[in-house]
Image (cartoon, coloured by chain):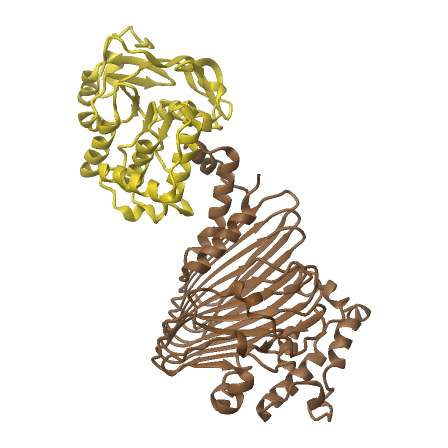
């Protein structure tokens, strides 16, 4: 590893952290921790982060994504205090969603949030709930997103100060979807959003995790380093929609870890639109029989953007199902990366897994690296995978032209459709409509 | 529907076409007048579907000789979309699925594009919705098909009905039905045939491409043509289809017909 390259970023980060958790400066430099267990978790993460090296292209996991530009940016942790006007944030609200937690630069903004308590749902920010619900939160927080071997998860945990907490107790069906809105406002800072979502037995909910930017200067750079943990107990169901619509100079590094118990079902749709460089790691562990996951992704990028999605679906137990569909639409000189690992452990017989990676190049400078990676150690399994990279199908274009559409109109419609297919399953009409418009605007040439 | 003052709608002369350096069409002659229904029959590989695609302008086929006159226009000079706008419609043998685009969106886009090119008013979504629902009744289609993605998850019969729905919306002068009957059960066949019969009038014409007589029981042709090896080798009235049904295509070779390639 090249030490000189990394010195700026890491030095800057560690200057803002104590060397050890028992340092007397601990309370001075970080928001107050109400609970010792959080301090201990952070202390472990700080130790771990100090030992991990900055990833480079020589690491297999980072082969196609060069994040060295980050190391040249001495971005300090974002500061609490600034809260934008409601009118500035309102455009990001989703009209059907009454439950909304808004975080500004990683800090909870109650004046922008709106919570209707449904049933026994525990919803709020970590800073507030850490005292009242320490027992239940400490049982989960940091348990699924392992910071061992993962520098960015370690850093997020080291800087843990606040976050979104949603805990649906047993048999709770949350009718209203929940919007977690993370707003970045400060230039040249790093912010550390954190989410913990727990569905106890038989619970059901829909959560939208949403990253947006609100800078006066649209060209300002910043780093988002987020960690999300989801735990589903027996028969629980979660629909998890993730939107990354950062500004086009942002760096977005995200880790999401999902743990599934018996017959639980995890459905996710992740949409990557923003950021100069983004990396989304999604790790789903099917830890008990009959668990299911459906994982859809869409990256829609242009003009020098890089969007990297790494997923790992780990079939630990028998009779589980996973279906994955990932699409990239890449225009101009943008670069999309997809690495889809599927592990079927020796015990995981009767696994049913499918993966499809479909990629559309809209320019001859666009680049796609797609890599299905199947590691199958059981013999009685069904695993299908396929990857395509290409341009529009000429028979499809002819079909539309034979109905009177011009070549351009036909191409535009098919490109739109390629992206819109992923949006079809979004259960929130206004959000679906907004995203369809975004896809429409970005796929139409004139 | 042959009448005395019929005018020529389509005139195909000595049409030759290649795909991937193989000649598929080897000199087709065909004249279709307004108000007529022509059936084209023949074995697999005889060039029927290629002929349909060449009429619609499929880019895989290169016309090497001959010409096609459509009303006063040189059809071969027009790209596919302008042929559609001029009134040529091909109902596909294998309609394309377009996941991600609602059928209603697609139908309205096609309808409005063609209408504006023809100098007519476009319809807004609400007006179009009423209009298309009326047309769907004709084909006994469930309005749910408007909200579904174009042809995605449609059964074979539903796809074919969706093709005829497009024909009803675009009101072509020449409708070319490429094996619209294949994959249809008898009930679906009757519905599709009823829709096609409803759409025909003295101003338009239809070319039916089919293997089987059974479609022709429901859409009765004025002329039946038999294709073989890229040419029309025999032309007759509707009774020719019955003869073929009875005797098979080999019968044509045993029969000492001399009028191969004669156009009507």
Mark yes or no: residue A165 visible. yes
Mark yes or no: residue B41 visible. no
Question: Where residue A205 appears, x then y in whole percent?
Answer: 40, 72
Horizontal side of A346 relative to B252 (left or right) equals right
- Location of residue A301 with respect to A144 vertically, above or below: above
Q: Residue at x 65, y 81 (%)?
A: A158
Near-viewer residue (A129 or B52)? A129
Horizontal side of B8 relative to A216 (left or right) equals left
Q: Residue at x 28, y 26 (%)?
A: B210
Near-viewer residue (B146 or A366)? B146
- Location of residue B77 with respect to A223 vertically, above or below: above
Total marks in image: 0
Q: Residue at x 41, y 31 (%)?
A: B114
Question: Where residue A76 appears, x then y in whole percent?
Answer: 73, 75
Residue B104 picture quarter: top left
Question: Where residue A33 appears, x then y in whole percent?
Answer: 61, 89
Could you say which chain is coloured yellow in the image? Answer: B
Quadrant (top left, top right, bottom left, bottom right) of the C terminus of chain B? top left
Question: Where residue A371 appears, x then y in whole percent?
Answer: 57, 57
- Location of residue B150 with respect to B242 vertically, above or below: below
Residue A57 picture quarter: bottom right
Point out the residue furthest to the right here: A4
Q: Colour of chain A?
A: brown
Point out the residue furthest to the top here: B258
Quadrant (top left, top right, bottom left, bottom right) of the N terminus of chain B? top left
Q: Residue at x 66, y 77 (%)?
A: A155
Near-viewer residue (A309 or B33)? B33
């Amino acid at each position: 590893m090249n030490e000189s390259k990394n010195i700026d970023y890491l030095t800057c980060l560690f200057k803002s952290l104590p060397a050890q958790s028992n340092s007397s400066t601990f309370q001075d430099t970080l928001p107050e921790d109400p609970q010792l267990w959080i301090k201990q978790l952070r202390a472990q993460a700080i130790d771990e982060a100090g030992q991990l090296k900055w990833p480079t292209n020589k690491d297999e996991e980072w082969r196609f994504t060069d994040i060295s530009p980050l190391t040249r940016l001495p971005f300090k942790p974002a500061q609490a205090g600034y809260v934008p006007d409601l009118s500035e944030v309102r455009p990001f609200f989703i009209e059907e969603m009454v439950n909304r937690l808004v975080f500004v630069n990683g800090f909870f903004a109650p004046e922008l949030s709106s919570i209707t308590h449904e049933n026994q749902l525990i919803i709020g920010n970590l800073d507030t709930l850490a005292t009242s619900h320490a027992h239940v939160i400490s049982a989960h927080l940091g348990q699924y997103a392992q910071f061992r071997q993962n520098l960015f998860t370690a850093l997020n945990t080291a800087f843990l100060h606040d976050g979104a907490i949603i805990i649906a107790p047993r048999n709770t069906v949350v009718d209203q979807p929940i919007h977690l809105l993370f707003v970045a406002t400060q230039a040249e800072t790093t912010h550390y959003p954190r989410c913990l979502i727990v569905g106890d037995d038989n619970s059901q909910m829909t959560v939208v995790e949403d990253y947006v930017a609100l800078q006066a200067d649209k060209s300002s750079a910043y780093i988002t380093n987020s960690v999300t943990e989801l735990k589903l107990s027996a028969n629980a169901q979660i629909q998890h929609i993730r939107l990354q619509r950062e500004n086009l100079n942002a760096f977005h590094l995200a880790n999401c870890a999902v743990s599934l118990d018996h017959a639980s079902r995890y459905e996710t749709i992740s949409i990557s639109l923003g950021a100069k460089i983004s990396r989304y790691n999604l790790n789903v562990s099917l830890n008990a029989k009959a668990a299911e996951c459906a994982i859809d992704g869409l990256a829609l990028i242009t003009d020098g953007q890089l969007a990297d999605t790494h997923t790992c679906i780990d079939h630990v137990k028998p009779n589980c199902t996973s279906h994955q569909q990932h699409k990239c639409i890449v225009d101009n000189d943008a670069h999309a990366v997809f690495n889809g690992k599927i592990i079927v452990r020796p015990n995981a017989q009767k696994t049913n897994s499918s993966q499809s990676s479909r990629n559309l190049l809209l320019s001859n400078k666009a680049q796609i690296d797609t890599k299905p990676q199947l590691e199958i150690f059981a013999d009685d399994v069904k695993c299908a995978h396929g990857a395509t990279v290409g341009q529009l199908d000429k028979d499809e274009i002819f079909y539309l032209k034979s109905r009177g559409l011009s070549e351009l109109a036909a191409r535009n419609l098919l490109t739109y459709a390629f992206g819109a297919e992923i949006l079809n399953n979004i259960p929130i009409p206004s959000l679906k409509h907004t995203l369809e418009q975004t896809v429409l605007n970005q796929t139409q040439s004139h | 529907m042959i009448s005395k003052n019929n005018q020529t709608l389509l005139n195909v002369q000595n049409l030759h076409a290649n795909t991937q350096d193989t000649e598929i069409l080897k000199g087709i002659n065909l004249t279709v007048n307004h108000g007529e229904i022509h059936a084209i029959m023949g074995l697999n590989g005889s060039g029927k579907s290629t002929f349909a695609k060449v009429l619609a302008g499929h880019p895989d086929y290169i016309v090497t000789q001959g010409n096609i006159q459509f009303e006063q226009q040189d059809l071969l000079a027009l790209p596919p979309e302008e042929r559609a706008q001029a009134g040529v419609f091909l109902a596909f043998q294998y309609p394309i699925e377009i996941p991600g685009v609602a059928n209603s969106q697609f139908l309205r886009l096609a309808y409005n594009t063609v209408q504006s090119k023809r100098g007519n008013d476009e319809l807004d979504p609400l007006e179009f919705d009423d209009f298309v629902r009326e047309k769907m009744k004709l084909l006994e289609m469930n309005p749910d098909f408007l909200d579904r993605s174009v042809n995605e998850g449609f059964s074979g019969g539903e796809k074919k009905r969706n093709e005829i729905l497009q024909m009803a919306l675009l009101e072509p002068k020449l409708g070319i039905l490429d094996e619209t009957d294949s994959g249809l059960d008898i009930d679906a066949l009757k519905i599709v045939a009823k829709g096609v019969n409803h759409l025909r009038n003295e101003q338009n014409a239809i070319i039916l491409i089919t293997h089987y007589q059974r479609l022709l029981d429901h859409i009765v042709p004025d002329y039946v043509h038999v294709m073989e090896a890229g040419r029309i080798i025999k032309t007759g009235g509707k009774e020719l289809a019955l003869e073929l049904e009875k005797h098979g295509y080999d019968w044509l070779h045993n029969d000492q017909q001399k009028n191969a390639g004669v156009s009507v």
